[in-house]
Image (cartoon, rainbow, N blue to C red):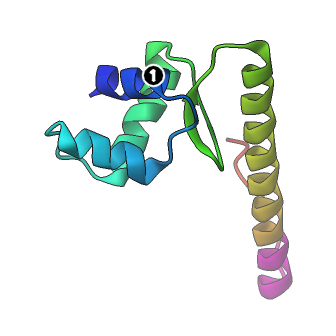
Amino acid sequence: MKEAIFNYLKNSPKPVKRPELLFYLRGLGFECSDREMRATIEEMVVHSGFLIGSSERGYATIKTKEEMDAAMKYLNAKAEAIAVRKNCILHNWREQYKEEYQPLLF
């Protein structure tokens, strides 16, 4: 499935939305859910060395420094939003239960 994903993204002139990629994979006979497809793409990037970026426009291979910059900017924004949400949950806990809570760092 990895090669099918990479080849589809590599040959697409624009970023590919998740539903389109999932439809393509199922057409090839891969019986996978959206979650399984996303997990495969994560594994491709984290453990297999593929250069695949994601954004609100979809998945795309990274071929230029500009595309790399865009991928990093998107991930930084997501990381910041997650950190804000985490801090709000921590604040809400402390307010609601009136006790200190020390979160794990990672």
Is 32 in front, or is 84? 32
Residue 101 position (above or below residue 58): below
Residue at numbered disc 1: 11
Q: Is residue 98 left or right of residue 8?
A: right
Q: Is residue 67 left or right of residue 63?
A: right
**Residue at (38% x, 20% y) in the render:** 7
Answer whether residue 106 is magenta in the image. Answer: no
Residue 72 position (above or below residue 39): above
The residue range painted magenta reads 91-99
- The x and y percentages for residue 51 are 56, 18
Q: Amino acid at mark 1?
A: Asn
Quarter occupied by the C terminus: top right
Answer whether residue 97 is magenta in the image. Answer: yes
Residue 84 in which image quadrant: bottom right
Q: Is residue 25 left or right of residue 52?
A: left
Quarter occupied by the N terminus: top left
- The x and y percentages for residue 40 are 37, 34
- The x and y percentages for residue 20 are 40, 48
